[in-house]
Amino acid sequence: MRPEVPHAGLNAVGSMHLLKDGRRMLVRPVSERDLPGILEHFRPTPPGRLSEGAARAYGELKAWLHVTTPGAYMLAGWVDDNLAGVVYFRDGPVSLPRRVMSFTTFKWLARKLFTWPARDVGQLLMWGFRRSLHRLAGLFRLSGRSATTIDSTAPYIHAHAGLITDVFTVPVLRGLGVAKALLAAAEAVLRERGATRVALYVASDNEPAFRLYEARGYGVVAVCGAPGAHHFLMVKELPSIGTATNT
Ligand SMILES: CC(C)(COP(=O)(O)OP(=O)(O)OC[C@H]1O[C@@H](n2cnc3c(N)ncnc32)[C@H](O)[C@@H]1OP(=O)(O)O)[C@@H](O)C(=O)NCCC(=O)NCCS
């Protein structure tokens, strides 16, 4: 059965994946109703340092934006109705706040702003402001080139490139092919949306994630960040629709 789940810009349906232990995993878009349960298991963490409360607010906000903003997506895998893992991604380089949020998100955000402690909201706003300044400084440095990101990796993240921003598998189901199946499903959505390439960043010391991406056909194209805390930018070219794949 292929249940239909409402999702901003994604009328995608569920797909079944066989895990290594023989169990079946349903992958489908995350709905607003699923979010509170998912956030108990996994919350995206901000790049850089934030207090615990502000980091929590960041994780909630990022999840809500992925579910309600056109061009941003979140798929979850379910085994026996229990969460197995999630993947966050978007279909282009434009940052989420610059995309149009849905009215529901505005309402949600307004409600949240009154319930998050003021110091966390303040810290989150300052963090966003500093990041924007940093980005702006980078854009000036790169003026003359049609770059949308501040680093030298911009050529890899162009209009036809999807960006995977988070992948997570619940600890008890690791090593069974959950993340591999979630990535395959995300790539299929991106391919349908016209992406010809998928990019992602991975911390250089995250061996399981690096091996996962390698196994899915991603290759390192650049190293970014300061020595000792650097990230790899990995890229995979997507075959055009109509070409057979082994996903
Ligand atoms: C990275 C992570 C998502 C992998 O999820 P998973 O469901 O266990 O991965 P899969 O079972 O689909 O593994 C797919 C491939 O990844 C590689 N891999 C996964 N875990 C690995 C590990 N611990 N060591 C080495 N390789 C590993 C293997 O190549 C594996 O293929 P194989 O089993 O056929 O050899 C999971 O460990 C996780 O949630 N980590 C915490 C969050 C995180 O770091 N996310 C990535 C952020 S960039």
Image (tube, rainbow, N blue to C red):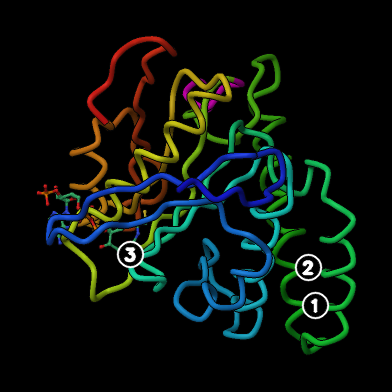
Please indicate whether residue 116 sits to the left or right of residue 214 in the image: right
- Decide if ligand 1 comes within 8 Å of the CB at mark 1: no
Identify the residue at the far left of this view.
21
- Marks 3, 2: nearer the viewer: 3
Q: Closer to the camera, 231 or 55?
A: 55
Residue 169 location, x and y as percent? 33, 64
Question: Which quadrant of the rendered structure holds the C terminus?
Answer: top left
Task: Kindly report the distance in space between the C-alpha atoms of the residues bearing marks 3 and 2.
Answer: 30 Å
Q: Amino acid at mark 2?
A: Leu
Q: Are marks 2 and 1 in contact (CB under 8 Å)?
A: yes
Residue corresponding to mark 1: 122
Residue corresponding to mark 2: 125
Q: Residue at x 56, y 19 (%)?
A: 194
Please indicate whether residue 161 sits to the left or right of residue 116 in the image: left
State whether residue 41 is above or below residue 10: below
Label placed on residue 243: none
Q: Amino acid at mark 3?
A: Thr
Residue corresponding to mark 3: 169
Q: Look at the image and give the residue range highlighted in magenta.
A: 154-159
- Decide if ligand 1 comes within 8 Å of the CB at mark 3: yes
Q: Amino acid at mark 1?
A: Gly
